[in-house]
Image (cartoon, rainbow, N blue to C red):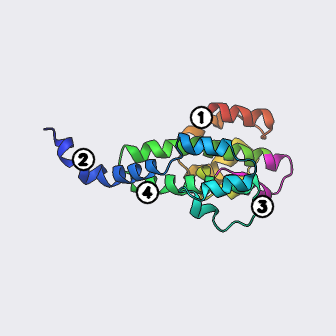
Amino acid sequence: MSRSSLTFNMVDGFLEAEVRGMKSGLLNVADYSKLTQCETVDDMKMHLAHTDYGPFIANEPSPIATTTLYEKCLAKLVKDFNHMRAQAAEPLSTFLDYITYSYMIDNIVLLITGTLHGKDMSELIPKCHPLGLFDSIESLAVANSPRDLYATALIDTPLATYFSKCLSIDGLLDDVKIENIRQTL
């Protein structure tokens, strides 16, 4: 018996049990079938109330908006993902971090593009995906060039090593340069 087999439960046993529990909470074929037969969003809410999504939508008044239902279901996903990421050991924790990077990139591009077009940061932050949020995200609004962006906000993020490749893009930021940064990242 290999050494890793002997220590599996010590390192990964708790998280495996958590994942097995989360798997039982996923919607199954019968749940999807019932959801396709719902005529209103309130019917969907009523069906989802009997699943693991129930506590997240329980206090929402009827009629519930589709955006509210989406936000509540996304909140459950983010809560479960962050819980798993907090419990994970290497190399799984690094893999879960990598999953968030694409959301971080999308959020950065959204904020830079929005501020270039005169949108207020308080209007843009709620549009960001919760898996891509990081501490210094609001300071992106002050950046005028890729170097400013790197120096003010991105240097403390996990994207810093990847973003350093974008520093060769000189000049002020515009839509084309922002798209080039997205493609480089």
Are the residues flagged by discs 1 and 4 in contact, CB closer than 8 Å?
Answer: no
User: Rounded to the nearest whole Å, what is the CA distance between mark 2 and mark 3?
Assistant: 48 Å
- Expressed as whole percent of the image width and height from the top left, the position of residue 150 reads 63, 47
Crowding near the residue tagged with mark 2, few <14, some 14–19, many ≥20 C-alpha atoms within 10 Å = few
- Category of crowding for the residue at label 4, using alpha-carbon neighbours closer than 10 angstroms: few (below 14), some (14–19), many (at least 20): few
On the image, the x and y values in percent for residue 124 come to: 76, 54
Pick whichever of labels 1 and 3 is earlier in the sequence.
3
The three-letter code of the residue at mark 4 reads: Ala
| Kind of residue sitting beneath label 1 | Lys
> What's the distance in space between the residues labelled 1 and 4, CA to CA?
29 Å
| Mark linked to residue 86 | 4
| Residue at point 65%, 45% (across, down) | 35
Magenta range is: 114-129
- Label 4: state its secondary structure: helix
Task: Kindly identify which residue carries mark 1.
Answer: 165
Q: Which of the pair 29/168 is nearer the observer?
A: 29
The kind of secondary structure the magenta stretch mainly shows is: helix
In front of the other: label 2 or label 3? 3
Mark nearest the camera among 1 and 2 is 2
Measure the C-alpha gap from mark 2 to mark 4. Answer: 18 Å
Q: Which residue is mark 3?
A: 63
- In space, the residues marked 3 and 4 are separated at their CA atoms by 35 Å
Q: Residue at x 66, y 31 (%)?
A: 183
